[in-house]
Image: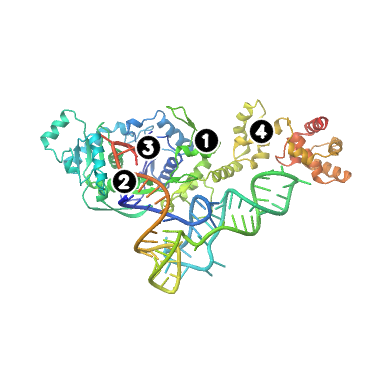
Amino acid sequence: MFPCLFLSLPPNFEYNGSERSTCVLPQKSQTGPLHIGGVRTALYNYLFAKKQGGKMVLRIEDTDQKRFVDGAEDYILESLNWCGIEFDEGVHKGGPYGPYKQSDRKAHYEEYAKKLISSGHAYYAFDTPEELEALRKKLETEKALNTSYGPHCRSEMDNSLTLNEKKVNQKISSGEPYVIRFKMPENEDVNFTDIIRGDVVVNTSTLDDKVLFKSDGMPTYHLANIVDDYLMKISHVIRGEEWLPSLPLHVLLYKALGWENEMPQFAHMPLTLKPDGKGKLSKRDGDRLGFPVFPLEWKNPQTGEISSGYRESGYFPEAFINILAFLGWNPGTEQEIFSMEELIQTFSLERVGKAGSRFDPEKAKWYNHQYLIEKDNLELAELYQPILKEKGIIKNIQFVERVVGLIKERANFVQEFWDQSSFFFEAPMEYDAKMISKGWKENTTEILKAFLSKSEDLEEYTFDNIELAVKSVLEEKGIGMGQLMMPLRLVLVGSGKGPGVIEIMEFLGKEEVKRRIEKACNSR
RNA sequence: GCUCCGGUAGACGAAUUGGUUAAGUCGUUGCCCUUUCAAGGCAGAGGUUGCGGGUUCGAGCCCCGCCCGGAGUACCA
């Protein structure tokens, strides 16, 4: 899996303005594709860009060839498309700053890596993995403050700082593998400002000589990101908090390349945490705790393992977006339901929180319910139809629409509709035992028959008329409402759920009600 | 270990930037309604704002120390 980057460019770009954004998508996601944390990062970038009137650009960061996952790129595209996050430029669309896939931009990285070498900001290193491992172990046993490749040890290693030029050229031309490392300055304070975190200072003595260019000819994230953001004229970098520790390096790279004035502004957003326990949300948490971590269902092409997605679980994209937006951001008002358009209007980086937020699956359901009850009955009926077809039930859309209108308030998802409404389509096959013992008395059959004969006389089987029939039966028999309504519900629905009993009767019609009552009475 | 970032009820989080009694939502509990369930309405529980000092008339907010959590510390992003 590789992450991708979102950039936004305003039509009239100026570096000192605050009108453009960019972000890095997923975190270390070897284990799977874009998950909700990544979509949320994309969303914030999108909201920021749209609010400022910028353009959204998708860049694919596929510099790690080992981690290529088949289908990942399409998955990203499809996910964001489902969410309603649109791009103006990118791998799939082209644009003035292409190509938008880093594996197609190798020449750029090589060029700037060489520039850094000639300006003395970087150097070639020939150390083998074994030598590197030995170095680390040695420094660890010495309890050195900094156990990585850096100023304190680079003079003892196999690199262009210790070797003479002839030797270096010889090694390179003979095809010996090499990397290019950044020459980290010694004991220098790096100051920078993060939009969300504020001012941060880091001393370079805690940093190391990061590899910028790998022996396979590809850049690392650090180099590729800086070069591309510069070339693509990015003004804002909005990415996950896990990048914050790399920011000093990035700042130093901008300086070393002489791009200090073109350096974008940074915003590092809080991580999304597991609902239980500790740590950031990972792929495994979802199905372990019974909620999706992916926007769309994902099938791992290598293992065939399937992870559930929000779309397949019945979440509406609008609800999903709303949930994500509130994961680390809030408007400061009491409004909780926001359309994408409202989010664009209201969103600001300043109101993004600093603390990591825990994802709450319960509240996610609540959000979906809010959107579901606001949906048009016809739209919901169309979503319900395929489910009915699977059950072998063919009904016209008007019928389904009426059913949906009666039951949608008690469901969070369209998938729950059948459980709430099966009795509208077919008579109950069995009766709930608890309801029988609670509501079915000796005289119940007699009461139901009395009700039946009352309703026989009804010319129009309307709510009001049925109610009148109910009342007169109660009066005649001198009984309470429960003695009639409980059995009626049992007979009609089969259990203790569903809308009001009279509403159900009105919907089913006189004949069907009669059939169900008689069937139940005869079977007693 | 080291570096950085965090810490307000079970969860998300507000607090006009130092100003009464620390919002609201989800969840939870009870009641009303519907003799079902859900929705809705009402009410309640839940907090020493991580801990300890300090500054101040006054601290969730500023300063110092500590504790806890997270991230980073790869030829991964």
| Residue beneath disc 1 | A311
| Residue beneath disc 4 | A400
Of all chains, the one bearing label 1 is: A
Please tell me whether mark 4 sits on a helix, a strand or a loop.
Answer: helix
Q: Earlier in the sequence, mark 4 or mark 1?
A: 1
- Horizontal side of A106 relative to A72 (left or right) equals left
Nearest the eye: A221 or A401 = A221
Point out residue A106 in the picture as x, y percentages from the top left corner: 27, 33
Q: Earlier in the sequence, mark 3 or mark 1?
A: 3
Please tell me whether mark 3 sits on a helix, a strand or a loop.
Answer: strand
Answer yes or no: are tags 2 and 1 on the same subunit: yes
Q: Is residue A245 visible?
A: yes
Residue found at x 42% / y 47%: A51
- Horizontal side of A409 relative to A335 (left or right) equals right
- Labelled pair 2, 4 in contact (Cβ < 8 Å): no
Q: For residue A246, which numbered disc appears in the image? A: 2
Query: Which residue type carries mark 3?
Result: Cys
| Residue beneath disc 3 | A4
Q: Label 3 to label 2, Cα distance in Å? A: 17 Å
Q: Label 3 to label 1, Cα distance in Å? A: 21 Å
- Quadrant of the rendering where the N terminus of chain A is positioned: top left
Q: Earlier in the sequence, mark 3 or mark 2?
A: 3
- Quadrant of the rendering where the C terminus of chain A is positioned: top right
Up-down: is A185 above or below A390?
below
Up-down: is B45 above or below A243?
below
Residue found at x 60% / y 36%: A414
Q: Label 2 to label 4, Cα distance in Å? A: 56 Å
Point out residue A282 in the picture as x, y percentages from the top left corner: 44, 40
